[in-house]
Image: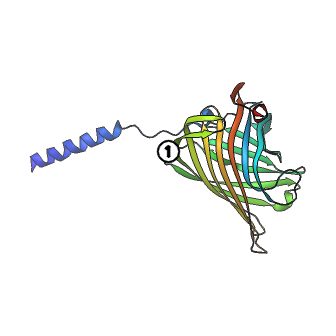
């Protein structure tokens, strides 16, 4: 019996030592994967279903060029954010990366209104491969959006894998593949479901992305879907040119 107890104790000690010195999976630092330098820009080849410049209704589109750029800084409640202008409709996002991940502080998607997010909305999180987390945020509308009231946003983010990705801008190794599933609920009963898959390259940013937005109208019971697939053509990050701009290829 004494010999058996000694054997069990020794085995437990070996297990404890092995566990203590087994390295845990570390979360990736998104500040290295999502550059936010003033003047940075990304050119994407896009396709999908949605609103295009000058159009009042949704339509299919393909082989369109959209440019995202970091145009300025803006302080929100004492936090310095970078203003990213996205796509042909020039939606503006005030973003910052911290120890938790990439956060959206303010969204301007029209000429007379904007949303402030409390706490800031987590777009992408610092996660280890296989890890998943859910985040909550309230959006408060101002200006033309003030009548919409508070909207609860949920977002479940998963770091699926690390992959090699080939896009028009080139071949990128060790890209972080994130998936996210979110919902935005309005006071009038309407809500939106948002699904996205995003690939980030070290020191470059988003090189590939697939987005699906489904708007649910409570009164009519009808759904409206918007999709957008983006592939990086070129970028200029921290003064470094990546890929060849589309206009230079023609």
Foreground residue, 105 or 9? 105
Can residue 78 be seen in the rendering of this structure?
Answer: no
Number of disc labels: 1
In x, y percent, where is residue 134?
Answer: 58, 54
Label 1 sits on residue:
129
Image quadrant assignment for residue 74: top right
Let me know if residue 196 appears in the view. yes
Residue 34: x and y, percent? 65, 36
List the single residue furthest toward the top: 239
| Residue that protrudes farthest toward the front in the picture | 250
The one nearer the camera, 2 or 178, is 178
Q: Which one is in front, 130 or 176? A: 176
**Quadrant position of residue 225:** bottom right
Judge left or right: residue 90 versus residue 235. Answer: right
Residue 93, position as x, y percentages in the image: 77, 44
Q: Residue at x 74, y 59 (%)?
A: 151
Tell whether 206 sits left or right of 55. left
Q: Residues within 10 Å of mark 1 (few under 14, many from 20)?
A: some
Could you say where residue 195 lies in the image, as x and y percent from the top left?
Answer: 64, 56
């Amino acid at each position: 019996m004494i010999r058996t107890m000694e054997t069990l104790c020794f085995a437990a000690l070996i297990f404890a030592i092995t566990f203590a010195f087994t390295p845990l999976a570390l979360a990736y630092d998104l500040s290295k994967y999502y550059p936010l330098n003033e003047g940075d820009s990304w050119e994407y080849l896009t396709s999908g279903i949605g609103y295009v410049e000058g159009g009042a209704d949704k339509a299919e589109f393909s082989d369109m060029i959209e440019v995202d750029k970091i145009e300025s800084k803006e302080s929100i409640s004492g936090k310095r954010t970078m203003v990213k202008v996205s796509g042909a409709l020039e939606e503006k996002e005030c973003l910052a990366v911290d120890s938790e991940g990439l956060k959206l502080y303010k969204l301007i998607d029209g000429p007379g209104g904007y949303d402030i997010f409390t706490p800031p909305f987590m777009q992408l999180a610092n996660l280890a491969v296989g890890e998943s987390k859910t985040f909550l945020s309230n959006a408060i509308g101002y200006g033309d959006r003030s009548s919409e009231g508070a909207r609860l946003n949920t977002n479940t983010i998963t770091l699926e894998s690390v992959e090699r990705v080939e896009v028009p801008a080139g071949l990128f190794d060790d890209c972080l593949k994130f998936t996210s599933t979110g919902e935005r609920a309005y006071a009038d009963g309407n809500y939106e479901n948002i699904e996205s898959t995003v690939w980030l390259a070290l020191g470059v940013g988003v090189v590939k992305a697939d987005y699906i937005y489904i708007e649910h109208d409570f009164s009519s019971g009808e759904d409206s879907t918007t999709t957008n697939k983006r592939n990086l053509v070129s970028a200029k990050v921290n003064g470094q040119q990546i890929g060849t701009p589309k206009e230079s290829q023609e």
